[in-house]
C-alpha cells in the first residue's frame, strides 16, 4: 500500500491540516468529505475565535502548538497574526502559578517572560492595572483564522491531488474482515460508497456518531461554550490575546470591539442527537443564553473598565469537544484496522496533531511522544457514557484552574478499587487516582512511626557537635526542603513509610500495574520479536525488557515472567502496552488483560523473607528463589504467583492472586504484625533513590534505551522491533541530580545561564537524605559533579549531577 486510498471525514481545520500533511508525504489519493459547505462547513472551526496560547504543562501539547504557530504564520497574515499572548494574574495563587508556567515554556522551548502590572498595561491599555499582580507574555502566541487556515491547507493538498467534497454526509463506515473498506455517503439525496484503505475521522464533536458507525467509542463530550463581543469602543486595539483565568475568561480584539470567551458558566453538554440538523448552516452554534453570560460580562468589565461604554452583542453558545483528561484522541480503532481518529483537537494544536498523525500513518510513528493522546490510553472502566460525560464536564469547569500535578478529579470516585481497599481505608489511606484506580499515597495509621522516627532523628542530631550542625544531614525528613506546592497531596508520614521499608518490611498495593498474559504456541518467539532483552529463558525466570518502536524509541519497560513453555505474564505500564501487543500478536498467540480480575501486593524490605517464609512452604531462600525468579505456591490459604522483583530496591516479592482472594492475602500478610502499609509517596522516593525509571515520565518514545540509561536491557545479537535504528552514540542522557529543594517535575535546568534540559521526576530521598531530581541533560553535562540550576517557580535551585544509583549501588540489599 504505497499510496493508500484515504478518506478524511470532516473538512474542519483538522481534516484540512491532515490532508496537507499527508499529501506532502506522498499520499495523494486523499478525499475529504464534509456534510457542510467548504470551508465554513458548520463545525467548531467555522466560528472559533482562534486564540492560540502555546504554553501547556504537556511537552507534547506545547510542541503541537508551536508547530501550528510556525506553520500558520508561514501561511500569511490572513491565516495567522502573531499578536502575542498575555495571561494576567489577579490573585497571588495565579501569580505564583504563572511562574510555574514560565518554567514549562522554558523547558519546552517557548520564549516567554513575566511582566509587572505596568508591563501588562502597556500591552493592554484597557486593563485596570490595580487589579493585576503581573502577567505572563509569550510574543509568538497569536490569532488563527481557522477557516482561512483550513482553506489554505486544503489548497495545497488539492494541488497535490486531494479532493474536497462539500455536501457529502457520511452515513456509514464499510468494513470487511476487521478492516475498513470505505465510507458510505449521501450527497444530493443519493447514496454511494467511497472506497478507502484508511479512514480518518476528523469530524470534531460529531466524532462519537461517526465512531458509532464503526463500532467504536469515541470518548468525548460536546459542550457549548459562550463567546460574545463588546460594542464598538473608543479605543481600538491590536493587543495580544488575553487570558483572565481567575475568572475563566479570555479576550481578543475584533477591530474596535473586544471578543470575550467564558468558561465560567455551567457545563452545557449537548447529546449527539441534539446536535443541529445537518441542514442548518451552523449546527455548531446554539442560541445564546444571556443569563449564563451576565456574570462573565461583569467580570470582564471589572478587568477592562472601558467595556462599560458598551454592552455585549453577537453572543453564541458554540459547541466543541471535551475529553475525560483534556487531551486529544489520536489513534486507530482497536477492533477495526484502518479506522483512525483525530478528534477533540483545538485550533491551537491542529497542525501539530495533523503532522503527528500523518507521520504515524506514513512511517508508523510520530517524532513527538503521543502517549498522552493515544486513543488506547483509556481503560474500559473509563469508556462508559457516564464517565465520559462526568469527566468531560469537569474538564470544562477546570479548564483554567490551577491544577496540582497529583490532584485527581473528584468524581466518579472511587471507580476502580483493589481488593485491599477496605483495609487501606481502615488504615487511613490518602487516595489519589491512577488509571481509574484508587491508589494510597500514605497511611495516617503510620503517624506513630513518624513520631518515632522524628524522635530518633532529633537524638541523632543532638549528638552532632555544635560546630558541625549546619553541615549535618537534615534531621527532619525533608519537610523543610518542600515548599507549599510540593507539600500538597503529601505528608511527612511518607518519610516514615520509606524508612520502615528500608529497615523492616512494607506492603505496597501494586494492583494498578497492568498485568498481561501472553499465551499459546509461538508466544516466546513473539515476545522475543517485540522486546529488547532475551525473554526466551527457562520457565520460572523473570526478565526486565523494553518495547521499542520502529525507530528505537521506548514504548514501555516491562517485566516478563515465563510461567510455562507457552505462557508469560507481563508487568506493563498501561493500556497502550496491551494495545501494542494485541495488534502485533500472530493468530495463535493470545494476549489477555489480567488486571481487572487479579491483584498484586509488593512485600518489600530486609524482613520480607522472614515475613513471607513464615506463611508459605515455598522455599524462599536466596539459593532456591533467585532474584528475578518466579514461582507459584500458597501463602496461607491463598494461591499466589510470586515474582522476586522490587521496584523500591529491596529484598522481596510481588505476590499475585485472583481478585477473590486478595483481601485474604492482605490479611494473611498483615497477621504476623511485621509489616506496615506503604503508599505511593514513599514508593516514588524509594524508586528514585534506586534509579528506577517511570515510563511516560522519565522516558518516552522520544528516547532510546542508551539515552535513558537502560542499555543493559538490550540484548546483543538479538532481533527485535527497533533494533536496526538503535545507536549507542548519544547526545543526551537521563541523570539524577541532587539538589537543595524538592521540585515536582517539568522544571527547566540551566547551566552557565543557558537552558540545557528539564526535570522528569523528583522527590526527597529519605534514605540518602537529599532531594533528588531526574533530568535530561546534554551528554557533555551528564558527568557526576557537574553543577546546574533548576528553575522552580522562578527561583534558582542549585543542583549537582550525581552518580547512580544513589542507593545500594552494590545490590547488596537485593541479592541476598
Ligand atoms: P470541526 O471544525 O467541527 O470540523 C468537523 C467537520 O466534520 C465539520 O465541518 C462537520 O460538518 C464535519 N462532519 C461531521 N459529521 C459529518 C458527517 N457525518 N459527514 C460529513 N461530514 C461531517 N480552539 C482554539 O484553539 N482556540 C480558541 O480560541 C477556540 N475558541 C473556541 C470558541 C468557541 C466558541 C468554540 C465552539 C470552539 C473554540 N475552539 C478554540 C475549539 C476549536 O474551534 C475546535 O477544537 C476546532 O475547531 C475543531 O476542529 P475540527 O476540524 O476537529 O472540527
Ligand atoms: N513490577 C512488575 N512489572 C513492572 C513494574 C513493576 N512493569 C512496569 C514497570 N514496573 C517496569 N519498571 C521496572 C523498573 C525497574 C525494575 C523493574 C521494573 C528493576 N530493575 C532492576 C535494575 O534496574 O537493576 C533489575 C534489572 C535486571 O536485573 O535486569 O527491578 O514494578 N512486575
Image: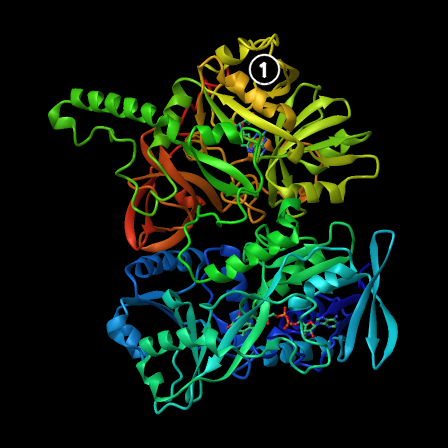
- At mark 1, the secondary structure is loop
Can residue 472 be seen at all in this image of the molecule?
yes
Between 779 and 219, the one nearer to me in the picture: 219
Residue 522: give x, y in percent of width and height. 80, 31
Can residue 816 be seen at all in this image of the molecule?
no
Between 708 and 645, the one nearer to me in the picture: 645
Residue 355: give x, y in percent of width and height. 63, 63
394 is higher (above) or lower (below) than 709 = below
Q: Residue at x 61, y 55 (%)?
A: 388
Query: Which residue matches tag 1?
Result: 626
Q: Residue at x 64, y 39 (%)?
A: 547
814 is higher (above) or lower (below) than 192 = above
Total labels drawn? 1
651 is higher (above) or lower (below) than 329 = above
Tell me the quadrant of ligand 2: top right
Q: Residues within 10 Å of mark 1 (few under 14, many from 20)?
A: some
Q: In which image quadrant can residue 76 be found?
A: bottom right
Q: Residue at x 51, y 42 (%)?
A: 433
Residue found at the far front of this picture: 291
Residue 630: give x, y in percent of width and height. 63, 19
Q: In which image quadrant can residue 727 be found?
A: top right
Between 190 and 522, the one nearer to me in the picture: 190
Residue 5: give x, y in percent of width and height. 81, 65
Name the colour scheme: rainbow
Amino acid at each position: 500500500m504505497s499510496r493508500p486510498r484515504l478518506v478524511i471525514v470532516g473538512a474542519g481545520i483538522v481534516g484540512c491540516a491532515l490532508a496537507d500533511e499527508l499529501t506532502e508525504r506522498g499520499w495523494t489519493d486523499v478525499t475529504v468529505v464534509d456534510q457542510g459547505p467548504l470551508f465554513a462547513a458548520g463545525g467548531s472551526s467555522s466560528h472559533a475565535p482562534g486564540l492560540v496560547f502555546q504554553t501547556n504543562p504537556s511537552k507534547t501539547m506545547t510542541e503541537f502548538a508551536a508547530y501550528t504557530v510556525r506553520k500558520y504564520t508561514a501561511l500569511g497574515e490572513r491565516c495567522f497574526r502573531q499578536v502575542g499572548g498575555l495571561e494576567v494574574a489577579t490573585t497571588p495563587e495565579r501569580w505564583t502559578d504563572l511562574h510555574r508556567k514560565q518554567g514549562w515554556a522554558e523547558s519546552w522551548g517557548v520564549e516567554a517572560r513575566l511582566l509587572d502590572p505596568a508591563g501588562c498595561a502597556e500591552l493592554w491599555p484597557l486593563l485596570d492595572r490595580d487589579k493585576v499582580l503581573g502577567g505572563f507574555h509569550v510574543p509568538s502566541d497569536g490569532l488563527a483564522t481557522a477557516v482561512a487556515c483550513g482553506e489554505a491547507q486544503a489548497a495545497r493538498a488539492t494541488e497535490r491531488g486531494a479532493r474536497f467534497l462539500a455536501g457529502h454526509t457520511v452515513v456509514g463506515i464499510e468494513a470487511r474482515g476487521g478492516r475498513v473498506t470505505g465510507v458510505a455517503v449521501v450527497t444530493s439525496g443519493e447514496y454511494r460508497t467511497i472506497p478507502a484503505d484508511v479512514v480518518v475521522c476528523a469530524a470534531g464533536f460529531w466524532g462519537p456518531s461517526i465512531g458509532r458507525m464503526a463500532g467504536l467509542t469515541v470518548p468525548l463530550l460536546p459542550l457549548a461554550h459562550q463567546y460574545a463581543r463588546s460594542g464598538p469602543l473608543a479605543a481600538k486595539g491590536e493587543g495580544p490575546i488575553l487570558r483572565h483565568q481567575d475568572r475563566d475568561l479570555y479576550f481578543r480584539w475584533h477591530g474596535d470591539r473586544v471578543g470575550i470567551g467564558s468558561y465560567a458558566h455551567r457545563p452545557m453538554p449537548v447529546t449527539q442527537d441534539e446536535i443541529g440538523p445537518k441542514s442548518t448552516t451552523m449546527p455548531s452554534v446554539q442560541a445564546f443564553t444571556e443569563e449564563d453570560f451576565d456574570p462573565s460580562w461583569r467580570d470582564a468589565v471589572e478587568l477592562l473598565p472601558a467595556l462599560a461604554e458598551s454592552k455585549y452583542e453577537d453572543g453564541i453558545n458554540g459547541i466543541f469537544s471535551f475529553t475525560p483528561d483534556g487531551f486529544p484522541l489520536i489513534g486507530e480503532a482497536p477492533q477495526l484496522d484502518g479506522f483512525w481518529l483525530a478528534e477533540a483537537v483545538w485550533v491551537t494544536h491542529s497542525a501539530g496533531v495533523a503532522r503527528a498523525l500523518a507521520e504515524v500513518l506514513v512511517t508508523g510513528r510520530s517524532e513527538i511522544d503521543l502517549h498522552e493522546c493515544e486513543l488506547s490510553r483509556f481503560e474500559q472502566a473509563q469508556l462508559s457514557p457516564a464517565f465520559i460525560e462526568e469527566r468531560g464536564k469537569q474538564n470544562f469547569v477546570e479548564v483554567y484552574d490551577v491544577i496540582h500535578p497529583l490532584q485527581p478529579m473528584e468524581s466518579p470516585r472511587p471507580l476502580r478499587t483493589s481488593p485491599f481497599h477496605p483495609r487501606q481505608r481502615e488504615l487511613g489511606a490518602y487516595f489519589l487516582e491512577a488509571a481509574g484506580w484508587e491508589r494510597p499515597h500514605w497511611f495516617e495509621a503510620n503517624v506513630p512511626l513518624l513520631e518515632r522516627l522524628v524522635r530518633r532523628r532529633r537524638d541523632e542530631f543532638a549528638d552532632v557537635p555544635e560546630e558541625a550542625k549546619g553541615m549535618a544531614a537534615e534531621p527532619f525528613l525533608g519537610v523543610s526542603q518542600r515548599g507549599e506546592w510540593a507539600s500538597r497531596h503529601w505528608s511527612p508520614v511518607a518519610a516514615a513509610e520509606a524508612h520502615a521499608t528500608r529497615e523492616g518490611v512494607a506492603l505496597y498495593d501494586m494492583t494498578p500495574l497492568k498485568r498481561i498474559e501472553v499465551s499459546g504456541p509461538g508466544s516466546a518467539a513473539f515476545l522475543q520479536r517485540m522486546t529488547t532483552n532475551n525473554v526466551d529463558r527457562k520457565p520460572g525466570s523473570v526478565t526486565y525488557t523494553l518495547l521499542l518502536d520502529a525507530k528505537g524509541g521506548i514504548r514501555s519497560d516491562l517485566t516478563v515472567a515465563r510461567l510455562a513453555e507457552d505462557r508469560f505474564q507481563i508487568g506493563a505500564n498501561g493500556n497502550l502496552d496491551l494495545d501494542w501487543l494485541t495488534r502485533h500478536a500472530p493468530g495463535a498467540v493470545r494476549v489477555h488483560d489480567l488486571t481487572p480480575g487479579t491483584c498484586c501486593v509488593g512485600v518489600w524490605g530486609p524482613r520480607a523473607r522472614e515475613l513471607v517464609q513464615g506463611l508459605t512452604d515455598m522455599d524462599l531462600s536466596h539459593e532456591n528463589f533467585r532474584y528475578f525468579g518466579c514461582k507459584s505456591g500458597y501463602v496461607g490459604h491463598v494461591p499466589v504467583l510470586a515474582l522476586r522483583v522490587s521496584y523500591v530496591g529491596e529484598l522481596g516479592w510481588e505476590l499475585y492472586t485472583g481478585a477473590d482472594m486478595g483481601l485474604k492475602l492482605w490479611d494473611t500478610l498483615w497477621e504476623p504484625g511485621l509489616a506496615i502499609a506503604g503508599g505511593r509517596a514513599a514508593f516514588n522516593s524509594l524508586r528514585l533513590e534506586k534509579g528506577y525509571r517511570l515510563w511516560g515520565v522519565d522516558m518516552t518514545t522520544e528516547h532510546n534505551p542508551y539515552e535513558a540509561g537502560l542499555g543493559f536491557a538490550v540484548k546483543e545479537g538479538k532481533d527485535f522491533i527497533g533494533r536496526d535504528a538503535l545507536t549507542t552514540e548519544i547526545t543526551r542522557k537521563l541523570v539524577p541530580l541532587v539538589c537543595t529543594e524538592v521540585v515536582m517535575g517539568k522544571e527547566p535546568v540551566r547551566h552557565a545561564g543557558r537552558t540545557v534540559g528539564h526535570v522528569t521526576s523528583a522527590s526527597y530521598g529519605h534514605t540518602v537524605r537529599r532531594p533528588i531530581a531526574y533530568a535530561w541533560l546534554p551528554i557533555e553535562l551528564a558527568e557526576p559533579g557537574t553543577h546546574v540550576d533548576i528553575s522552580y517557580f522562578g527561583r534558582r535551585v542549585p543542583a549537582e549531577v550525581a552518580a547512580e544509583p544513589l542507593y545500594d549501588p552494590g545490590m547488596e540489599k537485593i541479592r541476598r
